[in-house]
Amino acid sequence: MRNLKLQYCKEQTTGIPGGKQLLLQPDIERSGHEITYIVTDSEIFAVGNDVSNVQPPKLVAELPNIVGAEYLQLDNAICVATGAGEVLIINPDSLSQSEGTYCDVGIECMAWSPNQEVVVFTTKTKNVVVMTCTYDVLGEQPLDTGLADDQQFVNVGWGKKETQFHGSAGKQAAKQSAEFVAPLDVQKLPQDVQVAWRGDGAYFAVSYVAANVGRTFSVYDCEGKLQYTAEKWNGLQTPIAWRPSGNWIAQPQIMSNKSTVALFEKNGLRHREFELPFDLHVEPIMQLSWSNDSDILALHTVTADSQSIYLYTIGNYHWYLKQVLVFKEQQDPLSLFYWDNRLGAEHMLHVLLASGKRYTHRFRYGIDCQPSTDIVYVIDGKRLLLTRFSAAVIPPPMSWRVVEMHSYINAVSISENDIYIYTSDHKIHSYLPKDDSMRFSCQLSPDLAQIQLANLSCFANEFLLATNSVGNRTHILMLLKEKVKTSLSIAGTVNALTVPNGCKDRFYIQTLNNNHIYELILTPNSELKVLRSYLQLSHSVNHMIFYTTPSTPGGELITLHSEQLLQVDGKTIDEDVTSFCVVDNYLIYTQLNTLHFVRLSDKSGVAIRSIERGAKLVTSASGARLVMQLPRGNLEVICPRVLALDLIGNSLNCGDYYRPMCMLRKHRINMNIICDHNMSKFVENINDFLDQIEDSQWICLFINELQNEDYTLGMYASNYGSVKQSYPPDYTVDQKVSTICALLIKEMTNTDDPKQKARFRLPIITAYVKSNQLPKALEYIWEHKQTDAQLGEQLLKYLLYLVDVNELYNVALGTYNFGTVLFVAQQSQMDPKEFLPYLNELKSLQPDYRKFKIDEHLKRFDLALNHLAACGAEHYELALTFIKQHNLYSQALIAYQSQTDFHRRICVAYGDHLRANAQLEAASLLYERGGQLQQALLSARHTLDWQRVLLLAQRAGEPLAPVAISLVGPLQQQGRHLDAYELLKRFDAPDSEAPLELLLKGHLYGRAIYEAGLLDVDGTAELLAKRVKPSLIEYVAQLEASLGADRLLFLEYKQRLLDIRKRQATASAAANGAGDHELDIDEVDLLSDTSSIQSSRHSGSSRGTGKTFRSSKNRRKHERKLLSLKPGNPFEDIALIDALHNLVTKLGQQQQQLLVRDTCKALLQLHTEDERAAQLQRLYESILLELQPAALDEIWVPELLGGTVQHLTGPNVDYLALQKEQRYALIAPLKRYKPLLSIIDWKHGILH
């Protein structure tokens, strides 16, 4: 579907007539300063390409009868072969000459391999000589040498011609004889010899005239050994060309009824052919040449009055004639043409005329598609093939319509209404595809007929833009039919031209000399003018288009560079791009095997999908379709979800619901998008939705697919990334289904039109089912059953498609309507013997008890309990059993709240249940409500709620003192010394020392000093001195010892951890230097089986056992082994971090700070122990200084947090970093962070 477009035709004057060969330096262009060598019959000239500094050609060498030349890149030399047999090496800079080799019998032709490692000579005695690049002979043999016996073809009878398919030739072709007839006199045939190399340099073919055979060819390997000879065919011509990709050898052939180019395989067997549009007798082919990328085959033909170059491409096994370049024989005949072999210039064709003029043609592939339609125009010789993809997808080379012309078509330019066709005879034709007619045809003026028009583009619907480059300037022509309306000459060579769609006064061009993009305008007086430099690029572009969107009304320029770099206004989108197109607000482009979608408004990628390798975009078609052409030429049409959603969204914005519904069903897109696209608008226009969707099944389908999810934020978020969703008031996504169903039901049930009521019956049932309102669905069907029994049965059958019959039977039973139950049961496959006795039994029961039995059967226990409560006192025992069986105590307390006696029984039963589940506090409360004070007292005693115990004991009439004294021991055991002190203080003797003793045991020295003061009635402070002070001093000594021990342990663990890390760092550096990343076997054994180290480093070995620690006993054993503080443990650093975290937490917690503060305060109250208090305060203060965040940072380093190690996967895995990451993962998540200490005001300022 691609046409060959002429980017530019650059004309230069070399001043060297009669050129026979063109030599290019194989490197890329160097800003136009490269040197070209032109070889004539006896001279070699060097010509500069810098047109800004024109210099006369430089004579490199003058040799008689030059038969071949090659520029050797590695040697920077030119190898020249003469007819006399000399092979000379010429330095083009110093002009020195040296002899390469010599053939005493003379040389007819020379051909170097593409890699310039081997050279082939054919001598005038018809010998083939193969040499290395140092001119050492690899092989030599006559051209007529035949194949050995073991190399001959063997015919085993497969594929007889009579059984083969002959296409349009018909069955008669099988009966025609194709026997080879030897020529009568081979000496009358042209005796020229030509050599063609395969692209990889492994084989070469030689075309020659063989005795008794005539024109044929043989295939040799790069060592000069004969491998194959061609099968015998009549009519083969001299030119030969081997496709660089290696699959075909092309050679012209004259057959009895047609002229063709035959394509042979490497083994010499004929593979296929394509027919030529001319007679080889009248217009013989002088030269065949493939482009370096194997895409284009060029044919050089000669007639009496002109010479032509035909350019062929292949697609879907059909050969398309894309361009015909005609050169008049009487004006300036064609001397030679040559395909550029430099990287990136494969489609550059160099043409040299006899006068010395040089034309450089640069071609590119492009799609010609009419902007307002999806019609694609394909050039094939004198035919223009039209394919309209909205009508049908017709595989090439077939087409929807064919336009026949009298001359070969070179270019097509498309406007909104007309198609302009530019033919090889320099005529412009205007074709109207709408009417399938020609509007006009005109011959270009003689001045225009002498040049090649490039970048042909429609402008303002009536003009044609074209470029023509001469020297260092380019003429931009604006044509009106056959005449030049206006023109503009600018410096440089115009490489690309684009006209924005619908624009009538401006267009854009790129020049090669500086890669600038210029904006040109058409002034009111019809003159072209350069307005500004729009953009500066770093590379030349192959294709560019200008587009506008609502978000960018000024437009942006999309360019595809020759290096496959896609950019938008100079900003890179992606690399390795093979094709692109713009569809609505999306830029779509292909890479090797992927298709990408980019939103143009924010340049963000929204979707990627896989495609067949090498597929390229052709155009977009109606219905969100994309047409792609695969490498072999066949077409593939896809419907990307991104485009479909975009088209659906545009229709929804216009209030159209029918077309989106069709597309959603066709493309299998979730129908939630109908409402999620704009929920507020859908809710407002829900009646329009019901009016437009006339098929009730479609409405049911929409309702069935509703989900409590916003699909614009989930599945289809790519199309709605920058769009803010609009929700109605009081709407939540979690209630989406119920909200939409309620609105639909409301609209569908409010109609009075009988037709509408009939249309909405099934959707109403579906909405009830979707919103989990099955009872209402049954009620709706039962209402219709009362008026039309047959209709009711049909509606019930539909409901049974949506809901399981057993579930629906239970729902009907839950309505307590036996008519509905029987109606559902009769429409199901249920056996009447199963349900009729049960229904009859239910009918005989009292109504409330009947509802209880139904709810119990349906396991609706809450409702069943309410109905049972309504049955009265006769069912109390059943109710109590039912409550205990189904654990309905909370519901029963509410249901029986007005029935006092039974309510108490429920409370007692609930208390028993709670006490059995060790919830003693709640059980005590319920026992109290149930009147069981002793049980309430017992439960309260177990919870040590001494205030409540005393209250209950008082209500139960028990003496309070014994009860209170009995609670002192348990409270003391639980560490609640202050509560125990309160009880003793209240119920013990006033002068008892037991409360003081209790305070001393609990280390509550502040309260103990207070208590001792109360007991010291004589003011001697004897209790304080003999009881409180010794206990306090002893406790202070214990506290100091404990704090000191913990401090030393902290410092020891910290130093051990720092030493271990230092050793690990040294070992890691040594391992990196030695390249040894092996893990310790003990570490692998201790790692969890979820670790990826073992599998990545020791897969297939017996080193890792993949242990799992599933039982709690084994898990605890594993944790003890892992967190062992024994020196030498492989995970000693992990254990130390765990222990340090525990120590820091213990030493710095607020309880510890309060304890030190209260102890120091008690020492100060003694008036004699200030120094001891100050010593304790200084000790703890020094400990807190060592726990400052800066000191802890040495322990909790950043790598403990994880996520800092990069490149843990892939081929270049850092196994040492991965090991460290896995080790730290074994630490508890909380302990991977340093403890955060909250320091309060704990110090006493009076102490120093």
Image (spheres, rainbow, N blue to C red):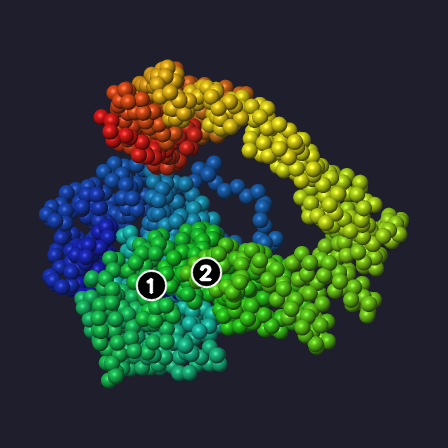
Q: Nearer the viewer, residue 15 or 1098?
A: 1098
Residue type at tag 2: Tyr
Mark 2 touching mark 1, by CB under 8 A?
A: no
Q: Which residue is mark 2?
A: 720
Q: Nearer the viewer, residue 843 or 198?
A: 843
Answer with left or right where residue 279 lies relative to residue 842: left
Q: Determine the residue positioned at 31% across, 39% down.
A: 140
Where does residue 126 sit, x and y in percent of width and height?
Answer: 32, 46
Q: Which residue is mark 1?
A: 558
Quadrant of the drawing holding the C terminus: top left
Where does residue 1151 sit, x and y in percent of width and height?
Answer: 39, 29
Q: Determine the residue positioned at 24% across, 52% down.
A: 28
Q: Nearer the viewer, residue 484 or 460?
A: 460
Q: In the image, which is nearer the foreground, mark 2 or mark 1?
A: 2
Quadrant of the drawing holding the N terminus: bottom left
Q: Secondary structure at mark 2?
A: helix
Residue 156, picture quadrant? top right
Q: Determine the residue positioned at 70% across, 48% down.
A: 897
